[in-house]
């Protein structure tokens, strides 16, 4: 690996670490009025389209199964999610949002739309879309090179 390649990796990592902090801070601000934390929003958001087992949520979100289990249990205790039978695996229940969970997510929508519009205005819609594509490519590439090792 050349020094230039190492520098690019370091700069990418530092930029993503900073972005992670910025996104977590923004997510906390957006989620708080709905009675959620960023972590609870993240887990609920992962199951809005279809119920998933805890391990599936963890894989999709890039976080540990144990932390998803803890958050899912809290969401269930709050009545924002429920465990449902999993036809593919008896022991790995599916996490599904309740009507109250969906309503909490919907309360985030207007502020989320404002932030999205502000970012699109700051970057331009095309550059914003390209940024997302590049970040997604970087994530896939990192998975690929780590698996190949």
Image (spheres, grey):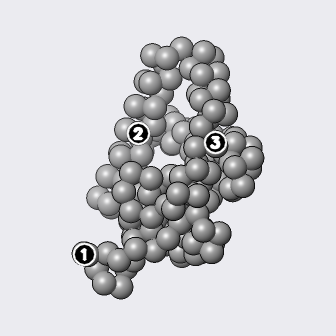
- Mark 3 vs 1, N-terminal side: 1
The residue singled out by tag 2 in the image is: 136
Q: Residues within 10 Å of mark 3 (few under 14, many from 20)?
A: many
Q: Is residue 118 above or below residue 42?
A: above
Report the Cα–Cα distance between label 2 and label 1: 29 Å
Residue drawn 64% across the image and 29% down it: 115
Tag shown at residue 107? none
Tell me the residue that label 1 is attached to. Answer: 88
Residue 21 visible: no
Q: Quadrant of the N terminus?
A: top left
**Residue at position x 67%, y 34% in the image:** 111
Disc 3 target residue: 108
Q: Nearer the viewer, residue 25 or 20?
A: 25
Q: Quadrant of residue 76?
A: bottom right
- Give the class, few, some or many, for how many residues have Cα within 10 Å of label 2's Cα (few <14, many ≥20): few
SS label for mark 3: helix
User: Seen in the image, is 38 located left or right of residue 33?
Assistant: left
How far from the left and from the top, in percent, is residue 12? 54, 39
From the viewer's side, name the closer residue of 134 and 52.
52
**Vertical order, 89 against 142 (above or below):** below
Side of 114 where 128 appears, left or right? left
> Vertically, is 53 above or below 136?
below
In the rendered image, the quadrant that contains the C terminus is: bottom left
């Amino acid at each position: 690996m050349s020094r230039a390649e190492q520098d690019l990796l370091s700069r990418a990592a530092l930029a993503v670490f900073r972005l992670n902090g910025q996104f977590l801070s923004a997510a906390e601000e957006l989620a708080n009025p709905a009675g959620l934390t960023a972590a609870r929003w993240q887990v609920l958001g992962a199951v809005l389209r279809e119920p998933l087992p805890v391990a599936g949520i963890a894989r999709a979100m890039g976080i540990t199964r144990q932390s998803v289990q803890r958050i899912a249990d809290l969401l269930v205790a709050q009545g924002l999610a429920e465990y449902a039978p999993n036809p593919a695996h008896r022991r790995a229940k599916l996490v599904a949002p309740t009507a109250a969970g969906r309503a909490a997510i919907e309360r985030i929508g207007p502020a989320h739309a404002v932030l999205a519009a502000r970012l699109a205005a700051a970057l331009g819609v095309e550059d914003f879309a390209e940024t997302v594509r590049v970040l997604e490519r970087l994530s896939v590439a990192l998975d690929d090179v780590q698996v190949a090792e």
